[in-house]
Image (tube, rainbow, N blue to C red):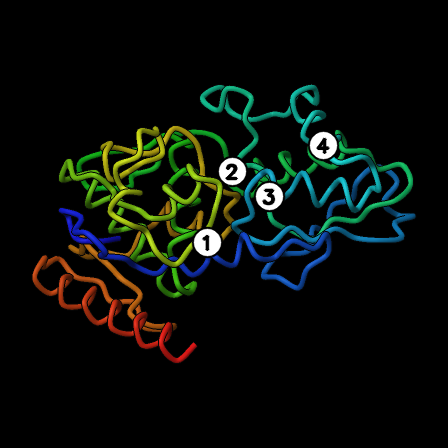
Amino acid sequence: MQTETPRRNTTRLTRRGRVAMTVTGAVVAATAVAVPLALAGADEANRTLTIPEGWRSGQVYEAVDKALDVPAGTTKKAATKAHLKVPGDAGGNAEGYLFPATYPLNDKSTPQSVLSYMVDTANKRFGGSGTTAGAERKTVNPYQRVIIASIVQAEADNKEDMGRVARVIYNRLDHGMPLQMDSTINYALGRSTLDTTHDDTKIDNPYNTYARKGLPPTPIGNPGEQAMQAATRPTSGDWLYFVTVKAGDTRFTADLGEQEKNVAEFNKNQAKARKDG
């Protein structure tokens, strides 16, 4: 997140978004839980598919294609015909509900069965009823909570920061401020990058949370349980800004001046890294 008014050449780091785009294998070492429940016939499973936290739906579809050895695009097409049990607010879009985990596969597995199991797992892990008290003066519905969790997953530098990132999101919503999340712009542009330019913040897109207030229309990836927990029970605090100055050093503040100093330090570190590289 940058300062409230984006400045030319001001950038911030979105580490997990970068990881989500660079990991492309079908079976990947990741912070994904093993699903104890079985797919149809999984007692005869002879291989597994691991979906890392934060992967976008396109990455999941490609991984399923490879794992099941079906033509590219098969799983994406299947998603529109599988009658997945996503919320009505999702409009049939499974983004956010392809639960990150390690799934057993066998010769009976199909794109439809794998996707259905992912969505069913998400519904069981996330819970699907009622509203969640996110900010002191507002509530969010279950689908909005998944949207927030997906942003938390993309923005948090580590799991310890997830609750604070969630609190920043709720605080900015509560104050009527645009979220200004680089991760949502990356999603709009189908990329992941360390840098967001001034021109990027001007794009005409519903996922541009610099130009538009409120949440983006859908999740921007598939969050794990810890991100969902953060979105459900954010850490208490008055923070409105954050920036990951360097790996493991994310600074949260409610003061714009302090945020500008932190961003300047981040830019300095980035310039040095480019020079050394």
Q: Which residue is mark 1?
A: 17
Amino acid on which disc 4 is placed: Gly
Element carrying mark 4: loop
Q: Which residue is mark 4?
A: 73
Amino acid on which disc 3 is placed: Phe
Spatial CA span between label 1 and label 3: 17 Å
Q: Which residue is mark 2?
A: 96
Element carrying mark 2: loop
Tag count: 4
Camera-near label (3 vs 4) is 4
User: In which quadrant of the rendered view does residue 259 lie?
Assistant: bottom left
Amino acid on which disc 1 is placed: Gly
Amino acid on which disc 2 is placed: Gly
User: In which quadrant of the rendered view does residue 85 lie?
Assistant: top right
For the point 34% across and 37% down, the residue is 132
Image mark for residue 99: 3
Camera-near label (4 vs 1) is 4
Left or right: where 191 falls relative to 157: right
User: In which quadrant of the rendered view does residue 144 lie?
Assistant: top left
Where residue 217 sits in the image (x, y, percent)? 38, 28
Spatial CA span between label 3 and label 2: 7 Å
Where residue 36 sits in the image (x, y, percent)? 72, 51
Spatial CA span between label 2 and label 4: 19 Å
Q: Are marks 1 and 3 in contact (CB under 8 Å)?
A: no
Q: Nearer the viewer, residue 97 or 218?
A: 218
For the point 13% across and 46% down, the residue is 5
Q: Nearer the viewer, residue 270 or 13?
A: 270
Camera-near label (1 vs 2) is 1
Can you name the residue that lies furthest to the bottom here?
A: 276
Counting other residues with Cα less than 10 Å from the Cα at mark 3, is it few (<14), some (14-19), or many (20 or more)?
many
